[in-house]
Amino acid sequence: MRFKAHESFFIRKGWLYKGLRNVKKQPELFSSKNINPSDVLGIGTNMVRSLRYWLQVTGLTNEVLSGGRHQEPTELANIIWEHDRYMEEIGTLWLLHYKLASNSEDATAWYFLFNEFSMKEFSKDDFVEMVDVYAKINGNETARSSLEGDFDCLMNTYVSRLKSNPEKVNPENNIDCPIGELNLIDIVDKKKKIYRKTAPKKGRLNPLIVLAVIIDRAKINRSGTEIKINTILTEKNNAGKIFNLDVIALTEILYELQKLGCIKVNRTAGLDVIKLDDELTFESTVKAYYESLSQ
């Protein structure tokens, strides 16, 4: 478990592109004594540590120790770099969110919000108290201030600052996190600071992104190619929880995937399962998503 590793900085627009570009040029950017990453990236020391963290927890880089500590772009990062290096496509943001919210080890608060936390509407105190209990049950004693800092960063990740604090934000100098475009969290009472998990609007979540997640979870969990729809809906880190989907929205997406010839849906005799094409992988499905954008 890890809390408040972001140095209180949420992801800024352009950060991940800048970080990935420079890691590709200099894999030892964050670890070499001969490189000053602040000079290379044009940001302060704490922001450098934050960016290093965000690159890793969004699934864009791995930190490799062999041959000298350095950063390596992941296969997902290389696909994104080829098709959407500025990370402006909504599907790219969904993928980054998936990697972030399924990272229980290094982005525990993000994982907890989408996978363990059952309240649909909540305050800061609600979340902090529940994540504190979760951490203690799992043998982790964390200062309340760190948990509060994670909540603030979480809300800055998913909720526009103009929406949550309009009186404190200059619209012309807005530095919202790009992942906020997904609208997975909304603020329902600005005065009392009450937040709500929200489902994606129809058409905002490409079925191929959902399929990529289903395939990834099936591989990680060794589930095979036949998967219960209820598993996709309720399993931790799977599409239902990660994307705030209810059974109706998920079923619609699965039938869209069936029309595309990607899966078969079997709801006869109470089976309620899908059959995956065993040749599809997470990476090939992500590539198919990007290729579909130009068709």
Image (tube, helix red, strand yellow):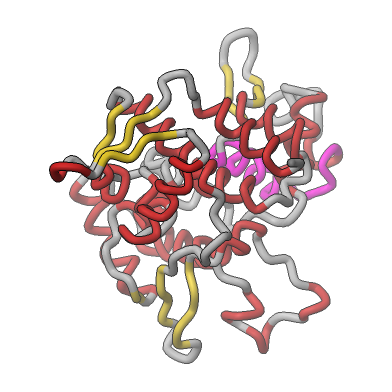
User: Foreground: 286 or 168?
Assistant: 286
Is residue 110 in the magenta section?
A: no
Q: Residue 198 in the image: state x and y as whole percent.
A: 44, 69
* Residue 218 placement: quadrant: top left
Residue shown at 70% from the left, 50% from the top: 89
Q: Residue furthest top?
A: 67
Q: Residue furthest bottom?
A: 191
Picture mark count = 0
Quadrant occupied by the C terminus: top right
Is residue 121 left or right of 54 when viewed as pictured? left
Quadrant occupied by the N terminus: top left
Q: Residue 291 in the image: state x and y as whole percent.
A: 70, 35
Q: Residue 173 in the image: state x and y as whole percent.
A: 80, 73
Q: Residue furthest left?
A: 269
Magenta stretch? 40-58
User: Foreground: 213 or 292?
Assistant: 292
Is residue 249 left or right of 231 when viewed as pictured? right
Is residue 234 left or right of 253 when viewed as pictured? left
Residue shown at 82% from the left, 24% from the top: 25
Vertical placement of residue 11 versus 78, above or below? below
Vertical placement of residue 279 versus 66, above or below? below
Is residue 49 in the magenta section?
A: yes
Residue shown at 26% from the left, 50% from the top: 234
Residue shown at 78% from the left, 36% from the top: 37
Magenta region, mostly helix, strand or loop? helix
User: Foreground: 139 or 17?
Assistant: 17
Vertical placement of residue 209 versus 120, above or below? above
* Residue 286 placement: quadrant: top right
Q: Residue 54 in the image: state x and y as whole percent.
A: 60, 44
